[in-house]
Image: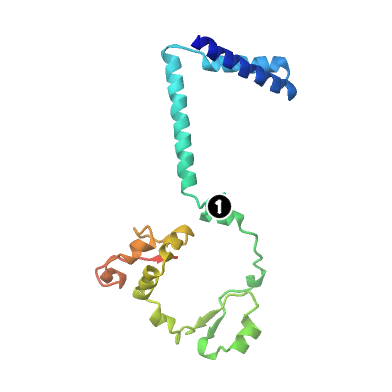
């Protein structure tokens, strides 16, 4: 009785599918051909059949796992992962005409460069400019040290998480995987003491 009930449900679903196929313009011969292919793919026996199914199942699981790993590691806001190759391919063409006759980078003494001279000669030229001694009196050189940045990030709610979320951390030939790991390094190493392993990161 149970088997008959299952067969009846299957037959009803098949009839519904057939009606929908007809309504969408599928010829009966094509519908029968699809049924034949489906029937063959589901039928089979013996050791060879078992191993074919096992291999197909394994490939399916591998594809699902790979897809999950790829999409789980992506920024949810991005359709394509953010990497240097994608960025370079998507970069709009830039004209290099402004630098075509340069054989060296223009250099100016920072003590002789005022706002008026910079605005008139350099600001809108599009040409690189090296300002020597430009940061000589910059107080940030004394303020922005390792301890200052560590305390700022650790005491600001969500700061470390924001670096992770916004893909801002760039380790360069170091073992660090996050800013949290960077700020946990020994003090001697953070100050580049002699004998300590060198490090560099950007964010």
Which residue does the image show at 49% across and 84% down from the upper left?
A: 134
Q: How many marks?
A: 1
* Residue that extends furthest to the left in the rendered view of this protein: 195
Which quarter of the figure has residue 90? bottom right
Q: Is residue 154 left or right of residue 30?
A: left
Camera-side residue of 25 and 174: 25
Disc 1 packing (10 Å; few <14; some 14–19; many ≥20)? few
Q: Is residue 5 above or below residue 173?
A: above
Kind of element beneath mark 1: loop
Which residue does the image show at 41% across and 69% down from the upper left?
A: 156
Q: Is residue 92 above or below residue 63?
A: below
> Where residue 121 appears, x then y in whole percent?
64, 84
> Where residue 144 appears, x then y in whole percent?
40, 77
Q: Is residue 191 left or right of residue 47?
A: left
Which quarter of the figure has residue 120? bottom right
Pointer 1: what residue? 78
> Where residue 160 appears, x then y in whole percent?
41, 63
Which quarter of the figure has residue 13? top right
Camera-side residue of 203 and 106: 203
Q: Quadrant of the C terminus?
A: bottom left
Which residue does the image show at 47% across and 25% down from the upper left?
A: 56
Q: Is residue 160 above or below residue 39?
A: below
Task: Identify the colour scheme used.
Answer: rainbow
């Amino acid at each position: 009785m149970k088997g008959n009930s299952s067969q009846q449900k299957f037959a009803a679903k098949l009839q519904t599918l057939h009606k929908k196929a007809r309504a969408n313009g599928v010829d009966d011969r094509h519908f029968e051909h699809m049924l034949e292919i489906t029937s063959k793919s589901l039928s089979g026996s013996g050791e060879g059949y078992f191993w074919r199914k096992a291999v197909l199942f394994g490939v399916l699981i591998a594809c699902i796992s790979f897809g999950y790993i790829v999409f789980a590691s992506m920024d949810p806001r991005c359709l394509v992962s953010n990497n240097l190759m994608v960025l370079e391919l998507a970069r709009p063409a830039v004209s290099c005409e402004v630098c075509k006759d340069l054989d060296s980078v223009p250099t100016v003494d920072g003590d002789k460069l005022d706002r008026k001279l910079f605005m008139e000669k350099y600001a809108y030229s599009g040409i690189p400019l090296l300002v020597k001694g430009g940061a000589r009196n910059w107080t940030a050189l004394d303020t922005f040290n390792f301890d200052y940045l560590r305390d700022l990030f650790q005491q600001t709610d969500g700061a470390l998480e924001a670096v992770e979320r916004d893909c801002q951390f760039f380790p360069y030939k170091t073992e660090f995987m996050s800013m949290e790991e960077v700020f946990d390094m020994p003090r001697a190493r953070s100050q580049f003491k002699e004998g300590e392993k060198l490090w560099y990161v950007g964010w």
